[in-house]
Amino acid sequence: MAIASASYGEDCTVWEGDHISLINFPHPIAHARGRWTDRIPSYGGLVRRLADEGF
């Protein structure tokens, strides 16, 4: 339900993860196990999209 309401009206990409991973804070255990995803490229794409749209 949250994804449906968050994506209403526009095309958006859904990032997998919990809050801590989505703010790009590497959990030590997830990082050690190779399960942490660096979000910098995702945020870079988001900033580029906003800039292209005039924000």
Image: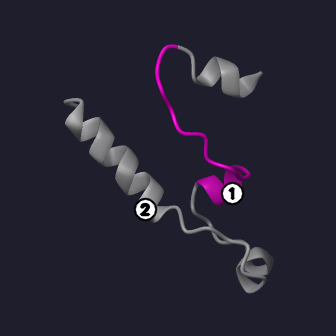
Q: Main secondary structure of the magenta part?
A: loop
Q: Secondary structure at mark 1?
A: helix
The residue at which mark 1 appears reads as 20
Q: Residue at the location (80% across, 79% down)?
A: 29
Q: Is residue 42 left or right of residue 4?
A: left
Q: Identify the residue shown where x is 23% and y is 39%.
A: 51
Quadrant showing the C terminus: top left
Choose the circle earlier in sequence order: 1 or 2: 1
Q: Nearer the viewer, mark 1 or mark 2?
A: 2
Q: Is residue 51 magenta?
A: no
Q: Amino acid at mark 2?
A: Pro
Task: Give coordinates of residue 8: x percent, y percent.
Answer: 56, 16
Q: How many marks?
A: 2
- Residue indicated by mark 2: 41
Q: How was this image coloured?
A: one colour
Relative to 41, say whether 19 is above or below.
Answer: above
Q: Residue furthest bottom?
A: 32
Of residues 32 and 13, the one nearer the viewer is 13
Magenta range is 9-22
The answer to whether 28 is drawn above or below residue 42 in the figure is below
